[in-house]
Each structure stands twice: as C-alpha cells, then as structure tokens.
Image (tube, helix red, strand yellow):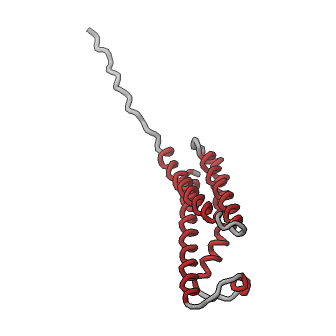
Amino acid sequence: MRNAYKVLAYIVAAEVAIQAMVMVWAIAGLVKWVDGGGVFDKSIMESGATPFTEVFGIIVHAINGTFVVPAIALVLLITSFFTKVRGAIKWAAIVFVLVVAQGQIGYLGHEFPFAGALHGLNALALFSAAFYTGRRIRTAASPVVEEQPEVQAATPV
C-alpha cells in the first residue's frame, strides 16, 4: 500500500504539471491564432470546430481538472487509510482538499477573472503538497535504526 500511496501522490503532482503545460500550450496557440486574425468567443468552443490545434489544451485541462485529478486524489485518500504510516491520512486529506479547492476556484474564475490568479497559486500549493506527500513515504518507510552500544560480558576475576 505504501508504494500505491506514493505513486498516487506523485501522479497528482504530475497531473498538476500537465495541467499547467496544456493551459500554456493552449494560450500560446490562442495568441498566435488571434494575431493571425482569428476571433475566439463562446461560439468557437460550442461549435465543436478546431480553429487551432492548441484548443485541445483547453479541453484536456477541463477534463483533467474536472474528472481525472479529483478521482486520483480521492483514491489517494482512500489508500491512505491502509498505508499504516503516521501522517498519511492527514497529507492525503490536505491534497484532496486542495484539489477540491482548485476545482472550485477554477469554476469561480468564469465569473471573477481574478480567481485565475488564485487558481494558479493554489496549483503551486497542490503540487508542493502532493510531491511532499509522495516523498515523505520514502523517509517514513525507512526508519532510522540507531546502533546500540555493545554490552561486554564481565570477565571473572
């Protein structure tokens, strides 16, 4: 269970990095497309057309953030109950709460664009927490064994 827990935590961290990558890819493509005369509005997303290849970054970000990352974080939290490492449940819960907050802040950004800044900041906190959650299992799984001083038998006089 420790390995599953560790892998799931690292996958959450990797997913956060993927989320950042696909959004920057999408925005870079959007800027290039708009510079070339394209117009991006709601009808483009609803049309199902692919005005520029990088629009798939927006789609991947939405699917990943809505379904994939929360599912992995939930499995991480469930796994934490069977890991038998001190603090495993606490750190999995922190990751899960940050994932839920991330989704809510992301949806809030549709009404209040400033929430996008908080979405990015929370992503950094989530990445850090997920990475630490995976890393701490390595240190928790290998307990430090202190050497005991040798006891010398008393020699009869």
Using the image as rendered, state which of residue 35 and residue 108 is in the foreground.
35
Residue 123 image-quadrant placement:
bottom right
Q: Is residue 3 visible?
A: no
Residue at position x 67%, y 65% from top?
106
Residue 5 coordinates in the image, percent (x, y): 58, 54
Above or below for 19 versus 83? below
Q: Quadrant of the C terminus?
A: top left
Residue 13 coordinates in the image, percent (x, y): 55, 60
Residue 108 image-quadrant placement:
bottom right
Residue 143 coordinates in the image, percent (x, y): 47, 40
Above or below for 52 versus 88? below
Identify the residue at the far bottom of this view. Answer: 37
Whether residue 112 sits left or right of residue 18 in the image: it is right
Identify the residue at the far left of this view. Answer: 157
Using the image as rendered, state which of residue 124 and residue 83 is in the foreground.
124
Above or below for 62 versus 54? above
Residue at position x 65%, y 60% from top?
102
Residue 34 image-quadrant placement:
bottom right
Whether residue 153 sits left or right of residue 110 in the image: it is left
Residue 100 coordinates in the image, percent (x, y): 68, 58
